[in-house]
Image: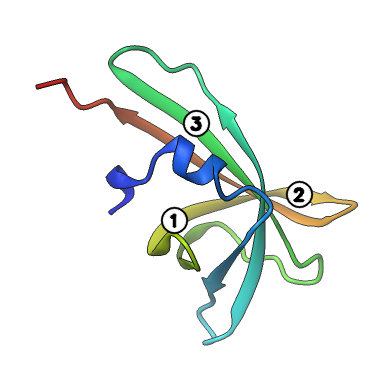
């Protein structure tokens, strides 16, 4: 599933809500606030997603089931990178080989 999700697809969803399922059956709402280009090459794609979550809840590092109104459900590995004025920040890094043109 993740291989079908592109940087452009996420960029189109900036400032929208993604719901993360928590181990205790709860839900944390995450706002996508940045999609950052990495050091991509013709054979490798790199980009990062940055989310804000509730300040009072640190999800920790791990894979979470995310759900989004437009993009649907998919798993995503999130790493907490610390709080700021908007809440707790999380990063997801994509680093994958590009498919060859047919």
Q: Which residue matches tag 2?
A: 82
Horizontal side of 14 relative to 21 (left or right) equals right
Q: Which residue is mark 1?
A: 76
Number of marks present in the image shown: 3
Q: Where residue 68 is drawn, which disc sits there?
A: none
Q: Residue at x 37, y 46 (%)?
A: 5
Q: Residue 93 location, x and y as percent? A: 49, 39
57 vs 1, nearest the viewer: 1
Q: Which residue is mark 3?
A: 47
Of callouts 3 and 2, the N-terminal one:
3
63 versus 2 height, above or below: below
Q: Where does the image place residue 45, in percent across and percent down from the top left?
A: 38, 25
| SS of the residue under disc 2 | strand
Which comes before the other along the chain, label 1 or label 2?
A: 1
Image location (x, y in percent) of residue 25 = 52, 87
Q: Is residue 89 above or below residue 67?
A: above
Residue at the farthest left position: 102
């Amino acid at each position: 599933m993740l291989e079908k999700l592109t940087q452009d697809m996420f960029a189109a969803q900036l400032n929208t809500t993604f719901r993360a399922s928590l181990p205790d059956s709860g839900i944390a709402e995450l706002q996508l606030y940045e999609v950052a280009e990495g050091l991509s090459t013709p054979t490798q794609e790199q980009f990062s997603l940055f989310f804000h979550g509730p300040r009072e809840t640190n999800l920790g590092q791990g894979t979470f089931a995310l759900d989004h109104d437009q993009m649907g459900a998919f798993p995503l590995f999130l790493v907490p990178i610390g709080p700021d004025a908007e809440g707790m920040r999380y990063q997801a890094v994509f680093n994958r080989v590009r498919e060859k043109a047919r």
